[in-house]
Image (cartoon, helix red, strand yellow):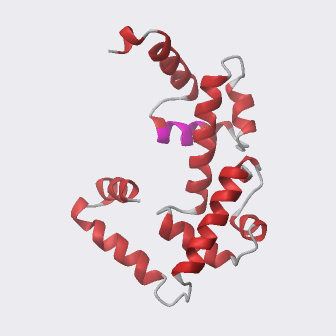
Amino acid sequence: MKQLLKHLMTRYGKESDLGKVSESIQEKYRKSGLTQEQALLIKQKINQALEGDKLYRNNEIGLGELANYIQQDRYKVSEVINTYYAMNFYALLNSYRINEAKHLLMSNPLLSVKAIMYEVGFNSKNSFYLAFKRDTGLSPNDFRTTEYYSYHHPQLAS
């Protein structure tokens, strides 16, 4: 959460404004009625749906579908994601997708980038490349090449 807030502040404001962003999130949900116990239960269900059940692979998943899947109110799910993950639903979804894509790029060198893109839930090559580059600073092909050489030729990476 702090890392995301720092990123937002360095991009859009001053790092000293981190507290203001956190306060604005708290203020936004001040009257929601969601208890910490409920929030933690919802967070646990979100983690299970994304990590365990790999729901992010569904290329048609939306906040409503996730909420239905974990049998929780859409607004409460959104609040938990915004508060506990410090990002919106699609940023959370993409973080899981990109993490799996990185793993697949390294563990399946013969699998095409396009096949990996579809496997992890992206529909669009452009969206996949933008999200991947935002996360890693590299294109998927460059990531694969860089990781391959740093693993197989560590002396070249130094």
**Percent position of residue 136, x then y:** 47, 35
- Residue located 55% across and 89% down the image: 33
Number of numbered discs? 0
**Percent position of residue 34, x then y:** 56, 84
- Residue located 46% across and 87% down the image: 30
User: In which quadrant is the C terminus drawn?
Assistant: top left
Q: Does the magenta stretch mainly form a helix, a strand or a loop?
A: helix
Q: Is residue 144 visible?
A: yes
**Percent position of residue 23, x then y:** 35, 77
Does 23 appear in magenta? no
- Residue located 58% across and 36% down the image: 129
Does 133 appear in magenta? yes
- Residue located 71% across and 17% down the image: 110
Q: What stretch is highlighted in magenta?
A: 129-135
Up-down: is 70 above or below 9?
below
Up-down: is 104 above or below 146?
below
Tell me which corner region of the image, top left, top right, bottom left or bottom right, holds residue 77: bottom right
User: In which quadrant is the N terminus drawn?
Assistant: bottom left
Tell me which corner region of the image, top left, top right, bottom left or bottom right, holds residue 8: bottom left
Please indicate whether residue 43 sits to the left or right of residue 49 in the image: left
